[in-house]
């Protein structure tokens, strides 16, 4: 009996030992499984955090929405670009920020609409302002069910750059046309010089000949009986002709002189010149540009010139200085025209004087003037105080470049709003 009990006891001990070993192995496996699960969970958490960090750093707006178009999440860029936060955006519809997609929840349909609209797409900020954008739409599955991801890129800078490029291309084409017209005008002026010269010579001859004929006529009239002289004079309206013909020839010569001056000015202005600088008379350049630009200012202003008579010659490019003065005169005429309704006809004044080491030229107007804040940016490229379509913001920037960089001079502006402006530049002699 004791042997049987001993055997049973040993069997029970062995079974318990085996059970303890199995329990230990199961505990070990459970511990390993738990560690693997925790590691997997930590990996998923790290991946989620990494994905979230990537989404936050993407420079585009990223919006996720459910199958009804209701916003679930937005990234950091959306907060800055759209002016909203995840808390404020959650529950709103995606087309609250993309009005062109109102009611569209299917990604393929939305993407087709985005591809068709292209640059006409506008996104709307929380404050109601809009900006051009590009949109990409895609479906994805999430634990919450079918969803859509919207990627929105702000292309405002690109659109502005494209508009500027088109403007520059237009300006370039216009400049090429003007260059061709200038060359043609110079050729026409050259060809007209000869006939104008012989017309002038003929009018001078006629004036001189009429003086001689008039002297002879007086002697012939002295030989006639008084009654015949009166009869003939009245029949031919002789007194009127004797009075008016000298005035007509004088006016003709005055007109021909003005035509000659204009032709010479056009020839000088359109002459291509040389790339290198040469000694030029600034006063002559001022006179030439004033004549050529007359059609720009004669209807709105009177132009006065106060030119120093002791100016030294300046080493310069005449064509570039013509361009400088043309821009300043045209700007002055526009400024006066903008104020014309209030003050009527204005005045443009061009002064030149000798200074230490060079010359100074000032172009003044009685126009609208320039505010202090605008004066600080007036020579910046593409900045303009004119209404859209009238100014490109390139004229004064070009003037500044030609004076300061090309000629080593100085350029500045002085102005009082509603009283006019004065642009002054200096050139080394």
Image (cartoon, helix red, strand yellow):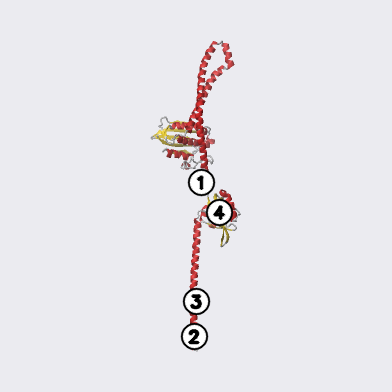
Residue 211, above or below 103: above
Q: Earlier in the sequence, mark 3 or mark 4?
A: 3
Residue tagged 1 = 161
Residue tagged 3 = 22
Residue 404: x percent and y percent?
A: 43, 39
Task: Report helix, strand or loop for mark 1.
Answer: helix
Task: Report helix, strand or loop for mark 4.
Answer: strand
Give the mark toward the camera: 2 or 1.
Answer: 2
Label placed on residue 136: 4
Task: Report helix, strand or loop for mark 3.
Answer: helix
Q: Give 153 or 359, whichever is nearer the viewer.
A: 153
In space, the residues marked 4 and 1 are separated at their CA atoms by 22 Å
Residue tagged 2 = 7
Can the viewer see residue 302? no
Q: Are the residues tagged 2 and 3 within 8 Å (C-beta)? A: no
Q: Earlier in the sequence, mark 2 or mark 1?
A: 2
In space, the residues marked 1 and 3 are separated at their CA atoms by 75 Å
Res 429 → quadrant? top left
Horizontal placement of 101 versus 11: left or right? right
In space, the residues marked 3 and 4 are separated at their CA atoms by 58 Å
Q: Earlier in the sequence, mark 1 or mark 3?
A: 3
């Amino acid at each position: 009996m004791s042997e049987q009990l001993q055997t049973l006891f040993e069997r029970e001990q062995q079974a318990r030992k085996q059970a303890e070993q199995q329990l230990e192995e199961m505990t070990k496996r459970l511990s390993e499984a738990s560690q693997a699960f925790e590691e997997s969970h930590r990996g998923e958490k790290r991946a989620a955090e990494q994905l979230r960090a990537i989404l936050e750093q993407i420079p585009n707006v990223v919006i996720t929405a459910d199958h009804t178009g209701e916003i679930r999440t937005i990234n950091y860029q959306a907060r800055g670009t759209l002016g909203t936060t995840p808390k404020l955006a959650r529950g709103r519809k995606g087309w609250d920020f993309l009005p062109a997609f109102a009611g569209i929840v299917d990604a393929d349909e939305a993407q087709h609409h985005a591809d068709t609209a292209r640059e006409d797409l506008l996104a709307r900020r929380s404050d109601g302002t809009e900006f051009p954008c590009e949109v990409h739409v895609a479906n994805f599955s999430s634990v919450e069910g079918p969803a859509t991801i919207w990627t929105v890129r702000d292309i405002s800078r690109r659109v502005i750059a494209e508009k500027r490029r088109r403007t520059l291309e237009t300006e370039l084409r216009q400049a090429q046309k003007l260059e061709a017209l200038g060359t043609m005008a110079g050729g026409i002026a050259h060809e007209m010089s000869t006939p104008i010269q012989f017309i002038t010579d003929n009018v001078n001859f006629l004036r001189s000949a009429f003086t001689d004929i008039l002297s002879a006529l007086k002697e012939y009239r002295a030989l006639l009986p008084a009654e015949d002289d009166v009869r003939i004079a009245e029949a031919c309206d002789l007194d009127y002709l004797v009075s008016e013909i000298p005035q007509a020839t004088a006016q003709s010569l005055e007109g021909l002189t003005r035509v000659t001056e204009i032709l010479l000015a056009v020839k000088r202005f359109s002459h291509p010149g040389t790339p290198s600088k040469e000694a030029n008379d600034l006063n002559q350049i001022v006179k030439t540009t004033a004549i050529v630009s007359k059609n720009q200012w004669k209807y709105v202003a009177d132009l006065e010139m106060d030119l120093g008579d002791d100016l030294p010659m300046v080493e310069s490019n005449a064509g570039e200085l013509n361009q400088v003065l043309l821009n300043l005169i045209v700007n002055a005429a526009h400024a006066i025209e903008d104020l014309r309704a209030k003050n009527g006809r204005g005045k443009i004044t061009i002064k030149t004087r000798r200074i230490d080491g060079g010359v100074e030229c000032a172009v003044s107007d009685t126009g609208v003037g320039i505010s202090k804040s605008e004066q600080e940016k007036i020579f910046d490229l593409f900045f303009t105080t004119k209404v859209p379509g009238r100014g490109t913001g390139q004229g004064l920037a070009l003037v500044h470049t030609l004076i300061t960089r090309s000629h080593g001079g100085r350029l500045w502006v002085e102005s009082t709003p509603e009283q006019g402006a004065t642009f002054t530049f200096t050139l080394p002699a």
